[in-house]
Image (spheres, rainbow, N blue to C red):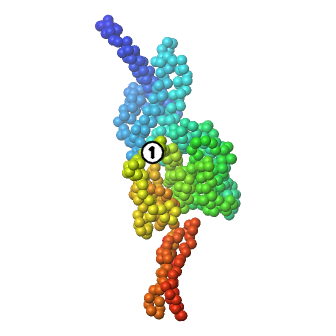
Amino acid sequence: MIDTIVALWLSQPEWLRTTLISIGQILAVTITVILCVAYTTLAERKVIGYMQVRIGPNRVGPFGLLQPFADVIKMLLKEVVVPSRSNHYLFVAAPLLTLTPAFAAWAVMSLWPGFAIADIDAGVLYILALAGFGAYGIILAGWAANSKYAFLGAMRSAAQIVASVAMQSTDYRMAVVDFKDFNDTTLGAGTDYSFRAVVTFTEDPTRIINGINTLGTPEGAGGGTDAESVYDALMNTIDGTALGGWRSGQVNRIILLIGDGPPHDPEPPTGNTLATVVNAASLSPSKRIFAVQIGADPLTSVYYTSLAGGTGGAVTHAADALGLAAAVIENIELITHVAPSIYVSDLSRLPGWDASAGTWDEASGNIGEDPLFIAGYYLSQTASGQGRQSPAVDAGSGPADARDIALANRTTRTDGVADANTVDMGYHYAEGVTLFTLTAEALPSEVDGLIHGSVSPAFSVAYAGAADNVVRLVACLLYTSPSPRDRTRSRMPSSA
C-alpha cells in the first residue's frame, strides 16, 4: 500500500509535487497558528475569570477545551451586516488586508532548522514590510463604512489627504497655513492671528501630516458665521515668501482654502477686497483657489464661490467637521482632473472644424455663431428680458450641476438667475448685473396735438460698472414758433 502511494507520488510532474508540498506546508503552518491563537485566547479568558473570581469557559468540551471552536461556529452563523451606504468591496477587503499580512509573515519564519515555507535572503525586510499593512486595513475599514464616526482621528484624515495628492501626482510640494482673525478686539480675539505658516513648502509627507494634525478643526466648525481673516491669509499665501516661495516653471499652483466663515470685505486692517485677492492670484505665475466650505452659511458660500470662480478653481462642501476629509479629497480630485484639451495641428486645423464649409461639427462642443454678449460677457436671453436668444445658452458639454462642471450656482444671465439644465457656454458670473433702461420720446404739441420732432436713440440700456455708461440723446425739431410750447421729454425708469 505504501509502495503504491510512493510510486503514484513519484509519477506526478515535478511542478505538481512542488505545489502540493507548498500547499501542505502552508496549511500546516496556518492551522497551527490558528490553533495557537485560539487556545491562547482560551487561556486568557481562564486567567481573566480567575482574576474576577469566575470559573471561565468550562461548558464546551472537557474543561472547556472546545470553546474556541464554538466561538468560531457562532461567528460564522452570525448575520453579516454591511452598512447600506458603505463601499461593499472595500468593507469586505479591509479585514482581509489586516489578516493576510499577519499570516504571510510566517512564510519566512524558520520553525526548526532547515524548514521554512519560503527561504529568502531578505526575510527580515519582508516581515518589516508586512508589519505596516495592518494599519491600512483599519483605515480602510473606517473609510469603507461610510460612517463619520468610524473615520474620526486627525492622523487618519491627514494621511488620507497627503496620500490622495501623492496618488494624483508623483512630484508635488505642499505647505500648511493656518488663520483665524485679526487680534483686534473690534474684529477678533486677542489670541487670534490673521496668518500663520505652519509648514513651509516641503516634499516630506510626515511633516505635512504632522502640520495638518496641529491645526485641529475647532469644535462646532460649520456652525459659525463670524468673519475671518480670509483675505490676509490668501494674500500672504499667494505671495509665498513666508512659505519658502512658489515653485517656478510649468506647474499647477493650487491654494486649498478651508473655512466656515466669510471674509471681512473690505478687510479693515489691510484694505483687501475680493477683487484684490482675485487680481493678485491671477498675476503671473497665477494660482488657482479651490475652496472647501464647512457648513452652509450663504454669505460664506457666495465669497468662496467667487474666490474659486474668479481664479479658475472650484468649491466643495462639508456639512460639518466630520465630513471635512471626504470634501478635501473630492476637491483634490477636481484639482487633478484634466479636461479634454484642444489640439492645434499644422496650419491650425482644429478637430471638429470644417475649413471648407466654415462650420463646426456639433459633437465638438463649439459654435460658429455670434454668442450675443451683453453687459460685458453675459449672454442675451429672452428669459431675462433681452430680445434675442444666444446660441451659447444650453450648449455646453453637460449638466450645470455635474461635479466636474459645478456651475449651477453661477449665472450667464443679467438678472442673476443661476444656470440650469445643460450648462451655458461662456463666462459664468457670481451674480447678475444692474441694468438701467432709457426710453425717450417726443411728445405731441399742446397747440395742435402733433409731434414736431424726434429723439434718437429712442431706447438704450446701460449697466452698472460699464466703461461708458453715458447715453447721448439727439433731439431734432421740425420747426419753431413764436410761442414754442412743443417740448421733448425723456424719462429713465430703472429696472434691476
Residue located at (66% from left, 47% from top): 240
Residue located at (55% from left, 22% from top): 124
SS of the residue at dot 1? Answer: loop
Residue located at (46% from left, 33% from top): 97
Dot 1 amino acid type: Arg
> Where is 353 relative to 467, above or below?
above
Q: Which residue lies furthest to the top in this view?
A: 3
Tell me if I can see residue 352 in this picture: yes
User: Between 352 and 131, which is closer to the camera in this rendering?
Assistant: 352
Percent from the top left, x then y, of residue 337?
Answer: 49, 45
Percent from the top left, x then y, of residue 67?
Answer: 40, 30
Q: How crowded is mark 1: few (under 14 residues within 10 Å), some or many (20 or more)?
A: few
> Where is 199 relative to 429, above or below?
above
Q: In this view, does 75 lie to the left or right of 254?
A: left
> Where is 5 relative to 202, above or below?
above
User: Between 280 and 213, which is closer to the camera in this rendering?
Assistant: 280
Residue located at (58% from left, 66% from top): 467
Percent from the top left, x then y, of residue 163?
Answer: 53, 39
Q: Report which quarter residue 75 is drawn in.
A: top left
Q: Is residue 466 left or right of residue 393?
A: right
Percent from the top left, x then y, of residue 415?
Answer: 47, 67
The residue that label 1 is drawn on is 349
> Where is 420 relative to 337, above or below?
below
Q: Is residue 240 left or right of residue 426?
A: right
Q: Which residue lies furthest to the front in this view?
A: 479
Tell me if I can see residue 423 in this picture: no
Q: How many marks?
A: 1
Q: Report which quarter residue 200 is drawn in.
A: top right
